[in-house]
Image: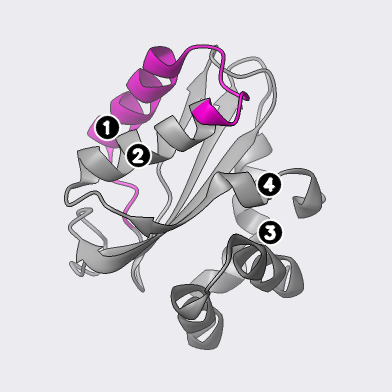
Amino acid sequence: MDLKNYLRPELVLLDLRGQTKEEVIAELVDLAARSGRVLDKEEALRSVFERENRMSTGMKHGIAIPHGKTTAVRDLVACIGISKHEVDFDALDHKGCRIFIMTLSPVDKTGPHLQFLAEVGMLFRSEEKRQALLDAKAPEEVISILLGAS
């Protein structure tokens, strides 16, 4: 999978305002919807909330990977959000999250979000890359960090 096909500056938000898991997810779905890549914003939001209710997508090291399979997209859509404050995402390490990588994938295509997440998996291993994302000043910088790490 070529990340360049999915990482777009208009799908990166460096100053997430959400204070809760639900607000962060809504903000990222709204970002995806404004890009024109989401056919039905409410359906996309429902799919991510439904998945999150089954099991939290808060990982370790301040990263959360909310995602949903939905009829609201034709192809994989990926959004990146960075927060200046920690958000409780019921993470595995019980710490707040600041880096959010949300994917929406079509229900009829198996595995595109898993391939995408495997490509950006370096975030789980590299404290340096995570810090670079938190320090990024522009969406293009976030994309460059992610592309350079895969």
Q: Which residue is mark 2?
A: 27
Q: Which residue is mark 4?
A: 115
CA distance for labels 4 and 2: 24 Å
CA distance for labels 1 and 4: 21 Å
Q: Are marks 3 and 4 in contact (CB under 8 Å)?
A: yes
CA distance for labels 1 and 3: 24 Å
Q: Which residue is mark 3?
A: 119
Q: Observer-nearest residue: 96 or 140?
A: 140
**Residue range corresponding to the magenta coloring:** 34-58
**Three-letter code, disc 1:** Arg
Q: Are marks 2 and 3 in contact (CB under 8 Å)?
A: no
Query: Which mark lies nearer to you, 1 or 3?
Result: 3
Image point 74% across, 66% down: which residue? Answer: 147
Residue 54, numbered label? 1
Q: Earlier in the sequence, mark 1 or mark 4?
A: 1
**Three-letter code, disc 4:** Gln
Q: Secondary structure at mark 3?
A: helix
Q: Secondary structure at mark 2?
A: helix
Residue 49, compared with residue 66, is above or below; it is above
